[in-house]
Amino acid sequence: MKRAYTVTITSKDIDARVEKEVLAIAPQVRMPGFRPGKVPANLVKKMHGESLQRDALNNSIQESVQKLIADQKLRPAMQPSVELDESFEFGKDAQVKVELEVLPVIEAPSIDGLKLERLTAEVSDAQVEEQAGRIATQQGALEEYAASHKAKDGDTLVIDFVGKVDGEAFEGGSAEGVKLKIGSGQFIPGFEEQLGGVKKGEEKTIEVTFPEDYGAAHLAGKAATFDVTVQSVLNADKPKLDDDFAKSLGLEGLDQLKDLLKGQIEQEHNGLTRTYMKRKLLDQLAASHDFDVPPSMVEAEFNQIWQQLQHEASHEADPEAALAEMEAEKEDYRGIAVRRVRLGLLLSEIGQANNVVVSDNEMNRLIMQAAQQYSPQDRERFVQYVRQDPMAAAQLRAPLYEDKVVDFLFEKAEVSDRAVSREELEAAIEAEDGDLKPHVHGPGCGHDHDEKPKAKKAAAKKKAEPAEAEAVAEEAPAKKAPAKKAAAKKDEAPAEEAVAEEKPKAKKAPAKKAAAKAE
């Protein structure tokens, strides 16, 4: 799949371009002693000849390479390498070496006989209640204990406090209405422990000693007292779910909140169903198609996968051990890169063979959606950039094109339905993720951004986080995934992207008071 050519650009062609440009710019040139627009061409050439020659050479090279690709009917896999002969001098012919890898010729992809199982999960009332409870907990809508209740581990206190050193209140040592969960370790050692058994309205003086390594040097190692007043004791395990809470989110009542949450959970289930079907679809395509792929595309794909794995390994408890395990499985990940590229090319070929296209209206919507991530003053520049750069437009178009090809294949396939629970659906997807060997279904796979290679020592997956309360209140749709890079031009195969980075979420630290633990 490698090709190499030598293109000759004659000095006559370069000179002709220079002369044409001289005539074009001469009317705008200003020179003392000459009327505007009357500067002789030979003087213009003398003044700007060197830069005009460089521009003419560069333009000639670009046009020659494009003509070569068109005349030879080449389908570049990556950007061609273009190198001007070192001995070139202006006034002589230019020899340009062009090297590139071309896409393989793929026989008409077989898409008959596809059989898929669609796993569907209904939304239960318990799921909606759990989701609503999580939002209420996040918003602090907790049930308050009776005044006689004595606080215990796990309870949340709402307190006021005044910190003193040597009997004098110190700056930053006082606060009101602070929420503190007993046993959370949020405050310095000894603070929370002394609040066990307090009741609503109780006042208590706590004696503590700041750690020697405390962040504020003037407090490090010093004994202090905190005069604490308990406003209330809350039960974090029993969030308050009622119409008033829903109205605090801008909704009409609890029923509307539950309806919105049910709709969001249904969207999550639909996404999981699609992910499972898509992976099974790619497995069948991979099993029935085999062809060589351009090494440069494989290397680019592997590098992205490897960078992602290195990023994840750096957040493991033992990064060195995680990196060592990665190194031992390096060839497996390279096999995943091969499979990803092959399936990406295959999906592109299927789409072209079956007239799958992204319409102008769809493309315009993509551009405008992507532009929203920029400041208002930069949006127009971004739009112009995408419209003028074919590769930028192709990268933006690719995810939608992929989805449309997959939808086309879903319509061609024989699909059977099976009802499962959400846990069973997630377990089925986890089983797909469980083995990263290239001869079975591995993460990534061509164009498939739903699959993400991970370092083996992955942390247990948390359940999907509940929708933000603000999103619920605004009835906002779920956020879209970041735009994924993929296809090059319409008549070229997708340029692969390993995975959208899964950045671990930083824990939101509480506002640090003097009593809070120094990190």
Image: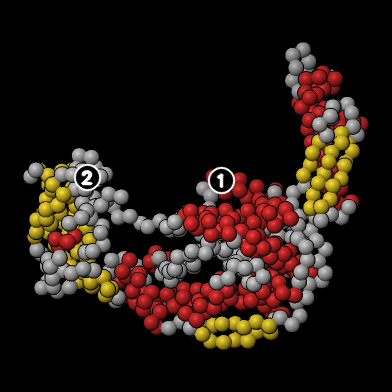
Q: Which residue is mark 2?
A: 212
Characterize the local packing of mark 1: few (<14), some (14-19) or many (20 or more) Cα atoms within 10 angstroms.
few
Q: Residue 214: in sight, yes or no?
A: yes
| Residue at 13% in and 48% down | 224
Q: Give me the C-alpha separation between circle 2 and circle 1.
A: 49 Å
Whole-percent x and y of residue 205? 9, 56
Query: Which is nearer the eye, 74 or 319?
Result: 319
Q: Which residue ends up furthest to the top in the rendered image?
A: 33
Q: Is residue 280 above or below residue 451?
A: below
SS for callout 1: helix
- Decide if residue 196 is on the left or right side of residue 281: left
**Is mark 2 in CB contact (under 8 Å) with mark 1?**
no
Whole-percent x and y of residue 370? 58, 56
SS for callout 2: loop
| Residue at 82% in and 39% down | 61
- Mark 2 or mark 1, whichever is nearer to me: 2
Q: Amino acid at mark 1?
A: Asp
- Decide if residue 16 is on the left or right side of residue 340: right
- Decide if residue 68 is on the left or right side of residue 408: right
Q: Earlier in the sequence, mark 2 or mark 1?
A: 2
| Residue at 54% in and 78% down | 428
Q: Which residue is mark 1?
A: 378
| Residue at 50% in and 81% down | 424
